[in-house]
Image (tube, helix red, strand yellow):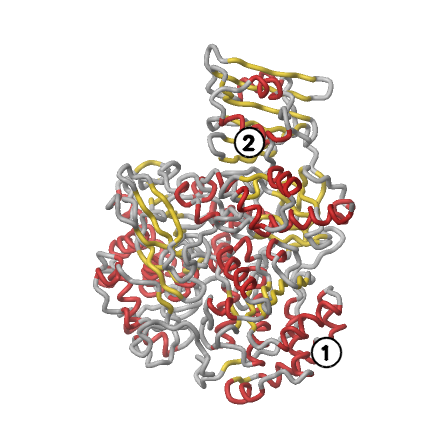
Amino acid sequence: MNETATVRTTCPYCGVGCGVLIARDAHGAVSVQGDPEHPANFGRLCSKGSALGETIGHEGRLLHPEILGASAAWDEALNEVANRFRRTIARHGPDSVAFYVSGQLLTEDYYVANKLMKGFIGSGNIDTNSRLCMSSSVAGHKRAFGEDVVPGCYEDLEQADLIVLVGSNAAWCHPILFHRIAKAKKQNPALRIVSIDPRRTATCEQADLHLSLKPGSDVALFNGLLTYLRRNDRLNFAFLEHHVRGFSSTLEQAQATMPSIPAVADACGLKEDEIATFFQWFARTEKTVTAWSQGVNQSSSGSDKVNAIINVHLATGRIGKPGMGPFSFTGQPNAMGGREVGGLSNQLAAHMELDNPGHWQIVSRFWKAPQLARKPGLKAVELFQAIAAGHIKALWVMATNPAVSLPDVKAVRRALKSCEFVVVSDCEDETDLKAYAHVRLPALAWGEKDGTVTNSERRISRQRPFLNPPQEAKPDWWLVTEIARRMGYGEAFPYRSVYEIFREHARLSGFCNEGQRVFDISLLAEFDARAYDTLQPIQWPVTDRRPYGTARLFGDGRFAHPDGKARMLALQPKAPVNAVDEAYPLILNTGRIRDQWHTMTRTGRSPRLNQHINEPYAEIHPIDAARFAIQNGALCRLESRWGEALARARIGEDQRPGSVFLPMHWSDRYAKRALANALVNPVADPISGEPESKHTPIRIEAYQPAWHGFLISRKPQDVPDTSWRVTVRGDGYWLYELAGEAAPEHWPIWARRTIAGQLEGDEWLDFVDPAIGRYRCALLRQGRLMSCLFISPTHELPPRNWLVGLFTEAELPVKSRMSLLAGRPASAEDDQGRIVCACFSVGLNTLTRAIRAEGYTTPEQIGAALRAGTNCGSCIPELQTLLAASSMKVTSR
């Protein structure tokens, strides 16, 4: 790689698809900044994107092929995989094998994996972790439009006069889009924002109206809106007559199920005036964008929720025009690209369908694949159930971790353990899948990979390498191609470079198309290597008629169904499949937090991303906390019919009574007994197959171990087995949150055994209070703090933020040595508190003191003084909360 050139690439996190500029100096040091020319982000990056430079080292990487845990040569490993798959197919048929892939793959990787499984193995059994987050949107788009198409673009968010965010904490999960929304609101005083979410999230800080609806009641709300629009003469009947089918029955069904605002209020658990306000705003505002994410998709009726949203846009003709339309915010960086090439088990490539004979003929001819799969394969949850039942004998998992991310994860792990042959290709070494893999193949990571991704607005961007491949790691497309050749399909997999795969993908998109399929990038089919390498971000379709791409679709009223008309669907509101009862009286809702991503294999490497929220927590309303005797900051135990987990209790009124929120990021690598998906029920939407991750009946109780503690050390420690353990990587230190159900007989002995690396001459300080079970110790070397351990019989322990600051000292000052074992700083100013701004490490106490002392009233004033909120902007909602709280205190005096 050229170590001085700037490389334009794309961020590997959410579906916003931000452009990133990478520069390397003569020493190889990498700097990361947003690409000001990329139309997704115009130079801004969120906290995760800004910290990408901290995640690219080789530490913890899988760098060599392995067979049964032993290093192997590439030929040996590839032949083992190919031979085992061939033998399994010969004995049990093509449906006895499966691939489980990922939205972290590039489009070219996805394309060859889908081609191998569906085209030449002849089974539909390739599915993706995108099934877990976006397949309900796919189903809704296909039912309404005839094809999986997002009609609008990001500019619509800036041109709208009303933005409705449904089941989307965009401020945390799509921060750059939310920044664009917030900026548009400042520039357009008429713009209103509605947040529809059971939780009060950071997104609500910018919203004009928050509808904390009953979990699972989205269809009832939008059926009620449809009824309101009809009664108030706000339907576009000219558009309906010419461009939509099914509207009559849909309107009748909406009227029958949700005839009035009181009926909607009862079904959704909302106040009538809140609903009336929302309905009035929607009815009167033509330029309306309704955007949704996992809160809609991850449901046993997610497809219906998507279509309920699309229904109101079709009914009013608000689609395909500037500032209006239904908009799915994609979760993963290339979930859209995977959908384009048929990564879901019920799709063919290039937006064609397995159950469409004409489409089957097109793909079979193009690939020269007469054995092309003729029926859909198993969806993600079904696939692992089939493994458990012994129907699938061989599995290849690519770039994902189903041992953490799938619902009913204990059952998934049992299935993996029982599978006769498991292949894992990944860039990471210590994942939860390692224990189940017979063969492991080292893959390239972000920064090393070469290919394309497609973001939420259909924009194709290049992901370019700026790092050399480490040791024996290889591209995912190369792995698949080599296995295909060894299985006897070499003629169909002749690829020697990634752009050859992209050209084939583009040719297939236009093959026998003639305008019948919206997805068409055929103009890019003749790219040579240089044209591919210099490809600029562009929105599909890209054809002779649309050589510069397409910002919006369906503005002409022509849709992708054979008759050119969209479909409205008559929908019956459905309660979630598993209801609460006396045994499990609360609803579990799982989701993401601001600074972490998926199972933390990348973000967990970054010290700054571990500062804002560094351990699993359960967010509980005060009513429920009182009911079940849960203390704020204490540990609690959550249990469902499928499993259990431990988490730190966070009590607050942002959570709806009767519901509990639990983040899904922590795996066994970073926490013990904290798997959110150990709790989540495996029921799925019958149409999309997307699991119900937002509604699992649970019960909760206080977890009361014999002791609580934490260990902070400059170097990683091999902590003895405890009942609760969370590992946090900090800037120059490692933090371990601990709890145990049995206390050691002698804490000093346990401490000296636990804290490794002690040398002769080290200074050991400790304090023991056996009467109440409190113990504290610290290890110093030449006056420098190396480790400290704090143990207590309760969860009430000293604040960690001040203590970790001591590890930055070359030598502890006298005042810090005196206060170290006391567990409190010599002065309040020494404790900055929990980190709020991850970009500049600005803490809660620092912010609170500055707001109080200087009388700040805006985030801009805070930013000018402390820099908080001036980089990615992800912390601005929290700054606004602090300002509002300070204002309320001043007013109440």
Q: Pointer 1: what residue? A: 259
Residue farthest to the top, as pictured:
761
Residue beneath the point at 66% across and 16% down: 768
Name the kind of residue labelled 2 in the image: Tyr
Residue 110 x %, y %:
36, 59
* Disc 2 packing (10 Å; few <14; some 14–19; many ≥20): many
Q: Secondary structure at mark 2?
A: strand
User: Which residue is located at x 60 percent, y 21 percent?
Assistant: 820
Picture mark count:
2
Q: Are marks 1 and 2 in contact (CB under 8 Å)?
A: no
* Coordinates of residue 406 in the picture (x, y in percent): 52, 52
**Res. 608 mark:** none
Is residue 787 placed above or below 595 in the rendered structure? above
Asked if 457 appears above or below 67 in the picture, the reply is: below
Secondary structure of the residue carrying tag 1 is: loop
Quadrant in which residue 265 is drawn: bottom right
Of label 1 and label 2, which has the lower sequence position?
1
Answer whether residue 394 is visible to the viewer in this image: no
Task: Give me the disc on residue 736.
Answer: 2
